[in-house]
């Protein structure tokens, strides 16, 4: 059995991948932000990362009292398609397949890093995509 997507363990793997991927760490080094990812099928299933100058410094469940700068909510199938690279991040947001809350201008100005961050959903080994 794999690691459930957006679980604390999965988020730890995601953070490690983020911090070792040039497209996210270097590509987003001008940003410090809190990003929250949610499953549309069960919005209580959420993971959060805190990024400081492009590096993830905290990853896991949403921290109490910490308001995210960006909230991205999508169905499991959409996260999988983003992770496989078959759905571009910009298209996913424009078509509302990913419900996006936060500064769209900041997101679009950092689109290569955002694309890389969403593709990492498909790079976490042994992800359990089931929602129960």
Image (spheres, rainbow, N blue to C red):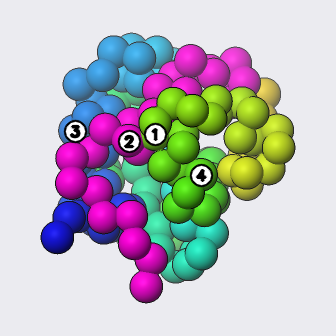
The residue pinned by badge 2 equals 122
Q: Residue furthest bottom?
A: 132
Q: Nearer the viewer, residue 9 or 60?
A: 9
What residue do we see at 54% from left, 40% from top? 82
Residue 83, how many percent across, how many down?
Answer: 46, 39
Q: Judge the density around disc 4: few (<14), some (14-19), many (≥20) Cα neighbours within 10 Å.
A: some
Q: Is residue 56 above or below residue 39?
A: above
Do residues under tags 2 and 3 come within 8 Å of each other at their CB atoms?
no
**Residue 21 in sight from this viewpoint:** yes
Q: Is residue 60 left or right of residue 70?
A: left
The residue pinned by badge 3 equals 16
Q: Judge the density around disc 1: few (<14), some (14-19), many (≥20) Cα neighbours within 10 Å.
A: many
Q: Quadrant of the C terminus?
A: bottom left
Do residues under tags 2 and 1 come within 8 Å of each other at their CB atoms?
yes
**Residue 33 in sight from this viewpoint:** no
The residue pinned by badge 4 equals 78
Q: Nearer the viewer, residue 107 or 43?
A: 43
Q: Is residue 76 above or below residue 110?
A: below
Q: Is residue 51 above or below residue 35?
A: above
Q: Judge the density around disc 3: few (<14), some (14-19), many (≥20) Cα neighbours within 10 Å.
A: some
The residue pinned by badge 1 equals 83
Q: Is residue 117 above or below residue 45?
A: above
Q: Residue furthest left?
A: 1
Tell me where the magenta segment starts and ends, as one range: 106-132
Residue 107, how many percent across, how many down?
Answer: 68, 30
Instruction: Kindly indicate the quadrant of the structure image that contains residue 115.
Output: top right
Secondary element at image label 2: helix
| Dot 1 or dot 4, earlier in sequence | 4
Secondary element at image label 4: helix
């Amino acid at each position: 059995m794999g690691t459930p997507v957006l679980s604390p363990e999965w988020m730890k793997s995601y953070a490690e991948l983020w911090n070792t991927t040039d497209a996210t760490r270097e590509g987003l080094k001008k940003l410090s932000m809190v990003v929250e990812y949610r499953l549309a099928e069960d919005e209580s299933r959420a993971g959060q990362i805190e990024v400081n100058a492009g590096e993830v410094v905290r990853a896991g469940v949403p921290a109490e009292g910490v308001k995210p700068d960006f909230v991205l909510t999508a169905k499991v199938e959409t996260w999988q398609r983003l992770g496989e690279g078959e759905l571009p991040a910009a298209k996913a947001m424009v078509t509302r397949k990913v419900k996006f809350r936060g500064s769209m201008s900041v997101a679009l100005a950092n689109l290569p890093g955002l694309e890389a961050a969403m593709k990492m959903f498909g790079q976490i080994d042994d992800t359990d995509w089931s929602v129960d």
